[in-house]
Each structure stands twice: as structure tokens, then as C-alpha cells.
Amino acid sequence: MKRNTLYLFTLFVLLGLVLSACAAATSEPQDGEAEGFTRGAILSRVKDRGKVICAGRTDLLGFGYLDDAGNNLGFDIDLCRAVAAAVLGDMNAIEIVPIPASDRGPVLQSGEVDILSRNVTWTSSRDASWGNFTIIMFYDGQGYMVRKDSGIETQEDMDGASVCVTSGTTTEKNLAADLAFHGVEFEAVIFEDTASVYGAYEEGNRCDVTTSDRSQLAAVKEGFADPDAHVILPMIISKEPLTPAVPHGDDQWLDIVKIVMFGLIHAELLGVTMDNVDEMMSSDNPKVIDLLGDGADWGYSDLGLEKDALANAIKAVGNYGEIYNRYMGPNGIAFTLPRGANEHWTNGGQIYAPPIK
Amino acid sequence: MNLETPSPSRRTLGEVPIWRDERVLRASAQIVSALAIIGFIAWVVSNFRIAAEARGLDLTFRFLKLPAAFPISDPIIPYDPSRSFGYAFIVGLVKTLLVSSIGIVLATILGTIIGLARLSTNWLISRLALIYIEIHRNIPLLVLLFIWYFPIFSTLPPVSEAIILPGPIYLSARGIYFTWPAFTESGRAWSIYVLVGLLVAIITWIVLRRRRERTGKATYFGGVSLLILIFVPLLGWILVPGNPLQINTPYLEGFNFQGGLRFTPEFAALLIALVTYTAGFIAEVVRSGMQAVNRGQLDAARAVGLSYMQVIALVIMPQALRVIIPPLISQFLNLTKNSSLALLIGYQDLFSVARITINQAGRVIPVFFMTMATYLFLSLMTSFVLNIYNRRIQFVER
Amino acid sequence: MTAPVENLTAPTSPGPIVWIRRNLFNNWYNSILSLLTLFIGYFVVTAIFNWVFNIADWRPVVNFPILYLVGQFPRDQLWRVFLSTAMVSLLMGMSWGIWGKLVRPFALSVGAFFGILALLPVQSEILSPANRALLFLNLFLVLGGFALRRFEVLRGRYIAIGWIVAGLLIVLVILPGFRGSAFLPEISTTLWGGLLVTLLLAGGGITLSIPIAIFLALGRRSSLPVVKGFCVVFIETVRGVPLITILFMFSVIIQLFLPVESRLDRLFRALIGMTLFSAAYTAENLRGGLQAVALGQIEAAKAVGMNNVLITGLIVMPQAIRAVIPALVGQFISLFKDTTLVLILGINELLGIGKAIINSDPEFIRLQAEVYIFMAGVYWILSSIMSYSSRQLEAALGVGER
């Protein structure tokens, strides 16, 4: 058993080599060391790879779900597509990594995904530990849904009730804080995935109350066998600014994603839609010309983008309003939800973006 | 030819080229393998340091004192969201320990029954046991867990239409409510009597049994200790003022039953799935253990006039246990580890709480290592304790 | 009085009445037990039949055969899956021809599986007559491969090489494809799913784990403290924690320990997790096999001048592996069942697809029982076939006999 130890050791080294080769095989060529977190690293990675990788979901109607043919659809998915169109010129150059709610922080921290676009509420602690948040793309608030015949109207009525909620979310913390504030004892029933929450609420009689973002409640209520048997209570117990996030450390990538989002918002205000982008190129409005790249440099040269990056993004997925209406508008394919706070500031809403100039 | 493996005595540095010298080879292999492992670890750690620095990951355990702010369903020990992350972790640990320990006891009982049924001379019973074993060994635990939880436990009727079983036991979508004795004010005093009785009974058992082994005279250790076990708590019951125990019947109030002993649907489904699944494996362990005992021993024991029960208790079991215990230990460990699947049906055990903490506190590495270390500690402790027991058995019987 | 061990029956088979009396009604309490069992059994069986054929709504099961088989794999690229299964079927048949009884149960089950699939009485656009024919082809490939044994050129080692080449081709070329290729366009592993992923994870996990397990088992017996220590710590750590934590580590944490610019595929990471987990258990099985090799053989080998590498490679290992083959098959079955856990990482293997189908239509939330019972049936059939095959294998190897 003496000499084979040498061979053993060789085997061991080989194993190490194979492992590192595996890592190297899937890694992109990089010149400097520790490039991954510095300015420009993510963009060059995305360009080499030819794909933007977004953490998303496949189980929430309207925001991230699958159609019959297995394609990824939804508001959050379209934001990812917009970035892919701006950066790579191809809205289909995306890979959606479906992740559970509790993995959102870790996948962003590890830099495994380029964008986290999965109903993420922007909070200070997440901003500090998860990654950088871009701009609020959907203003939401947490609400309660109950059965109509349960007689629950306020939090005080929930004393002793069972409440179904998803784990690893701001929702579960808000729930605890809100009901504690109202001095109500309750039983939390906590599931890993959204589907189990609503399954337990609707199908079983496990819970009296379920709580989540009101948009999500509206979405799932549509899908219930008898939507009219349920009611979303009027109170809003929290702010849920849903915001795409990017990994810490690469300012350029943060700016790129932010500006693409600004562009989508501005396009709606300026009347640029996915169908009229080409015609608008000849518009006399200098703001439109700037947005579409034929005017002043809105920063694209510094960000390493083509000048028509925003034009491509709008051409691919449409402006903010088009994306919203596609899924949640009056004729939305998922459900209908009034714009409300998600109207532009000029229309009394809160959607507002810094100028593109 | 012979030079390939010369005997060590003949081998000196002068005769053998240095690259064939065993000591040199050994030493260099030692050094190189150490370097390789250290190098690998250094590579991993440096990668990690770069990542941690760039993303500002906090690697300290200070966050454990911060309030957790998330609720835990059915926390068993008092918990509310204002308690710390560290305490929440302990709640998760307690829930894991609870379901595993109850699960181990029940799985052993059920597994033994099925294992014995498998050996029954009744063809039907033996086939039935075989079907049970084949079903539970060939279906993934996760599928069984889903079947027990989603279609069965979560679709029980609402509390107002609960199924009432004798007891009364109420079955509803909110859980199983048992009628259960609860301690009254004098209960604490009485429980001391119970404990003392138990202790004295155990000591009596050991002392009398030793004496019998020494002197060979019957000391009736079983009966005497049983008497003590009954008599002392009975004495307490008379001496303690009032009634120490009160039957606590669940009653419907508000959204839920109050009182009684409650198993939440999550706990019940997890427990049943773990017990029935593991019992399938334990049954096979028990069967092969019993079959390992030489049949001649049984005949011999019967021939010298031992009763059937005596044969089982004094001849078969002690020998079968030697074969049964080691694989049984690994089944116990499997059950404990498998309880981590709980998070998929909403029972918040150690792993589930850890996962939420990772997300809410944003501290991946510290929480993850705490979790791994806790499971490792549990496994090593369980196998350590059971191995001591195992060694005793093996020693005594040889 | 009963004995705990079943009586050996007489060599001549008794009549049915005698059999019933002897096995069901040999004393009063067995008689009661038998009657009770028959009585309850009748009600349970009729209730089950009633549920399966009259009450249950099997839509979420029968409407999505392709989803269950390959997940979101692009439908226009399905030929790549067919090609892969065809290669496996042919090789199975040829292995059966070469190794006979050892492989026969596995080969027959593969053939039967595709035969049944081709004749599945469900309506689906994808299960067109052409595709059914393709599935049926697999059955002929198994038999055809077996028939090839007439040609003497086929040698075991060619088949072995064939397996390795086919495995690598399927996993690295045929299924993933290449970026920008028109003929084999890239298919991201996030789209793979269903039984395909379950089998890839189980098969890949067990295959990759064997070399690692050999290393760990030898390392644990090594006289070098560093190597031995590393192996002991590795094996005991992996065996001491739940698989779910290991998968979690490889899904979330591993990324922090690799160079920042690298990004391992999620499915590949799940595979590494499964592999290392399985390797620790296999290593312990293998260690038992190593200890079973008689010391005299090693001494004899030394006496004829073999060095330690030759002894390990030619004398000890072959015997140890032969001794643990049944345990390896057992490990494969439990790995097959354990693949269900990767659904926690968002990978849609068979059970994950079942869950996804339930979520795809609010109506199906009420039909969970059907989906999960179907899942239980599929897993039960597949792993029962495997354990049956492994018992045959055990008998053929003569391992269980003394």
C-alpha cells in the first residue's frame, strides 16, 4: 500500500484538475483576476455569453408564468427581455432561472444571475445585503384576502385565525408586524411556494386568511374556481415597491438596467410604442430623438451600448404602458388590474423616471 | 523482477535509487497530497474572499441577536417574531427533534410489527406485510409526503364540520385535536412524584437484577419495579391537594378548536409519512435479523421446555438484536435527516427556518454552516450514543 | 403454536384446500386474522377500483404525456431525445447479447418501457403515430442489439466503450447542442425536465460517483494521514447531513467559492450534489467490499512480484466491485428516488413537472390526489423493475449465495 498512495495522490490532483477544468469550461475568458465585480464585468460577460440571465418565476399569473407552449411570459419577464434587447439586440436572448422566493437573495449575492426580476420588494436591508436595486417598476401594497362568508372585515376580526403566507418574503414579516400591532393572535401557515399557499387557502380549509401583494392576490383570485366567493380587504398594510435588482459591485450594469427602465417609462409619456419606433425616429420632438439615439448621447457611449439600445428595447417589448396592459390592462391576457399608483405622475400615479438626455 | 518489491530490510538509500525509495516516496506523496488539499482549500477560500469582499457579505454571527421578525407556524416553544434569529433557529431545531424523536419511536414499533407480520405463518398476513414493504420502499418519500399532505390532510373538512372520532378526537383541516389530560395547579407537585417513582423503579430494577445475576435466586425485579412505578405516583395523587390532572377536551371557539392536544396537519402529515416510510425499511431489518437466528436454537429452546414467549424474549430477540441494531441506527439517522423535507409541506423545521433566516437576514454562509454543523452534530451524537448501546449488546451476548 | 420462521413446505405440492388450511387457518387466531383481512381487503380493493375508474379525474395526467417525459424540451427538437433513447436501447440490447443474464432484466425492462409508452391509450398531438412508431422502434433496437451477438466481432470492451461514447454524446452533444448551430441549436438545461432529467440525474450521478467512491474508499484505507483524514471527513460529513442541505449548498452557496466569472449550469450543479452525496455512500459500500477480499490473495500477488497499483487494480478492486454490485444497484434506486428533491432548486424533474402541471390550471389544484398518485405509481413501477432486476443480477453473480 505504499506506492499506490502516489497514484492515489495523482488521482486526487487529476480530480482537482478536472473540477477546475469544469469550472473553467463554463467560465468566460477574463484577463484580470477578480473582474467579476468590477465595472464592466457583467456587460462583457453578457456579451460573451450572448444571453442575459434573469432570476424569475414560472408560477405567478401576470408577472412570471408559462404559456401552453412552455414559453416564459409576464411583466417581470418582459423587463428582462427589454434589457436583452437593449444590450444584445435580441429580446429572446434571455435565460429565465426559476427560483423559489427564499433563494432570491443568495442568487443575487453569488452573482449567478445578471438581473433579479421576480416581484422583489425593495427594502433597505435587501439593498444592503442582496444587491443594487434599480428603479421601482410596480407600486404595490400588501393586502388580505378572505372568504366572503367568513365575516372578516378588519384585522381585529382575525383573532385566532390561520393565515397562509409564503416563506422568505417581506410579506411574512409585514403580516407578523401588522397583526402584532393590532394585538391579534394568529396562526401562521407558511409554505415554500406560492402555489401551495393558495392551494391550502382555496382548496383546503387550512386558512381563513391569505396575505400577499394586492396585485398577486388579484391575480390568483381570478384563477379560483369561484372568484366571487373571496374578497380582498380594502386595507393596505405595507409598501411593496417591486424593483428589479442587480448584483453588487458593477456600477455600469446597474446604470444600464436603470436606464433601460427609464427608457420604457419615458417612451410611454412620449408616445413611442413598439409599433411606431421607426416612424418616431423622424419626430421633431428632441426628447424622442434623444431617447431613440439619434440625438445627444444619453450616456450610451460611457455604458458601452449602441446608441439605438433603448429604441431596440422599446421595439421588442413596447413601452411601460404596453407591457402593463399586455398582462394586466383592460384586455390583459392574465387579468385586469387598474393602473392606480402605476399611472404616470402626470396622470396622478407614481411612475416617474429621471430624464433621458 | 525481484527488485520491484524488495524487502524493506534490504533497502537502504545507498542501494535503491531515490525515486524508488519507499520512505522518500511516502514522504513526498504525503507532502504533495497535503499541498494539493491545502492548495484546493486556499483556492476556494481566496475565491470566496474576493466574492465576499466585492459584495460586502457579512460573515459574523452578530445578526443572531437581531429580531427575526418572521412568524413560525406552530412553534411548540413560546415564540413570537420579536425574538432573535438565534432563538428562531432553536425553535426550528426543537421542531426537528420533536418530529424525529416521536417518528423514531413510532417507526420502530410499526416496523417491528410489520417485520414480524412478514414472518407470520399466515400467508395472507405475510403477503400484506410484503405489499406494504414493497410500496414504501419503492416510492420516494417526497411523493408520499405530498400525498399525505395535499390530497389528504389539507382537504379534511373545515373545523365546524370536523370528523369526530371516539375520545373525542376531532379531525379537521386545522389539524387533529385529541382529548388530553392537562396538568392543573397541583400538577407540578404530582409530576415530581411521578419522576421519583420512575427513578426508584429503575434503580430497583438494576439492583435486583444484579443480585439475581450474582446469586442466581429469583428476585422478581420486573414485578417489584412495576409496583413501585405504580405505587409512588398513586401516593402522590392522594397526598397532593386537588386533582393534578384534568381531562382537557377540545372545544370550538372562533376560527379554531381550543384546548386539547393539537397536531397541525403539517406535523401530522410529516410524522405519518416519515413513520410509514421508515417502517418499511425497519420491517426488512427486523425480518432479516430474526431470520439470521439459527432455527436449531429455536427447536433446542423449545426442547428444554421454554414457553413460546420465553423463546422469543430470551433466545431469539437477544441474538436478533445484534444483527438488527446497526442497520436500525442508520434508519434512525435517515429518518432524522429525511425530516428536512418538512419545508415542502409547510412544517418549519431546522432547515426551513435556516432557509428563511438566510433570506431575511441575508447571511448565507454563517447560517448555512450553523445548519450543517447542527445536523452533523445530531447525526454524530445519535450514532455515538446508539453505538455505545450496540457495543454493550454485542459484548454481553458474546 | 406458531414458529416465527415459516415452515418449509413439503416437496410435493399439496392440494389447494390443504394449502389454504395450512397457510390461512392453521389455528384459531390465524383464522380470525385471515377472515378479517379478507373482509377489510375486499372493501379497500373495491374502494380503490371505484376511485380509480369512476371518481378520479385523470386529465392532469393523461393530457400532458410529453411534459412528464421531457418537460419543456422544445417540441421541434424532440428527435434528439428519440435519437438518445435509440442509442441507449441498442446498446442495452447488445450488452444483453454479450453479458447475457446480467443485463437481461434491465434490457427487457427498457424495451418493455418503450413498448408500453408507444401503446399508451392517451390522446396527444405529440404522440402521433409517427412518434409512436419511433418509440416502438426502441423495442426492436433492444431485440436487434441482442440478435447482433451472433457476430463475433462484438466484444465486451467495445460495448463498454460504446456506452461511454454514447453517454458523452447524449449529455454533451445531442441534448444540449451548440450555440448558433442550425442543425443542433442550443437548448438550455432550464428547459429540460420530466423523466429525462430524473434519469439523467440518477444515471449520471451513479456513473460519476463510482470513480469518486473508489478514490474515497481507497483513500480511507490509505496509510497517508492527510489523504485518509480528508476522505474520512468528507465521507462522514456528507453522510451526516440531509441530501437537501447538500443540494442547497450546490444550488446557492457553491457559486461563492468558485472564481467569480464562472457560472456552473444549475442542472450540472444539482448533478454534482447528487454525485458527491452518492459517492460517500458508495464509498462505504465499497470499503466493505475491499475488506472482504482475502488478505492471502494480496500476499500471493505480492509474492509473484506485482506492485501495489497492479494489485489494487487487477486483484482487489475487481473483486470488491463485484461484491458490491447489488449494493450499487440499490444505491441507484435510492438515488433515483432522491432526484425528487431537486424540485426544491427549481429544476423540473418528474415530480416538479407534476407540481408545475397542478399550478398551470386552477382547476387542477383540486386534482392533486390524481397527480401524486400517478407519480407514486410511476416511481413505484420504475424502482420495482430496478429492484427486481437487481435481485436477478444478484442471483446471476452468485453474490448472495454462500
Image (spheres, rainbow, N blue to C red):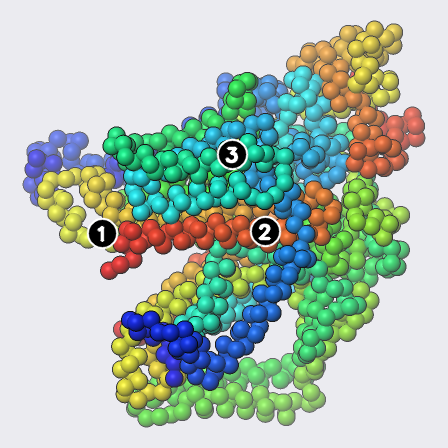
Q: Earlier in the sequence, mark 2 or mark 3?
A: 3
Q: Which residue is mark 2?
A: C374
Between A124 and B70, the one nearer to me in the picture: B70
The disc at residue A187 is none
Is label 2 in contact with label 3 (beta carbons under 8 Å)? no
Q: Tell which tag, 2 or 3, sits nearer the viewer.
A: 3
Query: Chain under label 1?
Result: C
Hey, what amino acid is under mark 1?
Val
Q: Tell which tag, 1 or 3, sits nearer the viewer.
A: 3
Q: Quadrant of residue B346?
A: bottom right
What is the CA distance from the residue labelled 1 to the residue labelled 3?
A: 49 Å
Q: Which residue is painted at 52% across and 87% down in the image?
A: B229
Q: Disc 3 on helix, strand or loop? A: helix
Q: Disc 1 on helix, strand or loop? A: loop
Eyeballing the image, is C222 above or below A19?
below
Between A241 and C269, the one nearer to me in the picture: C269
Rendered location of residue C51, percent (x, y): 65, 59
Q: Which residue is painted at 65% across and 14% down in the image?
A: A304
Hey, what amino acid is under mark 3?
Ala
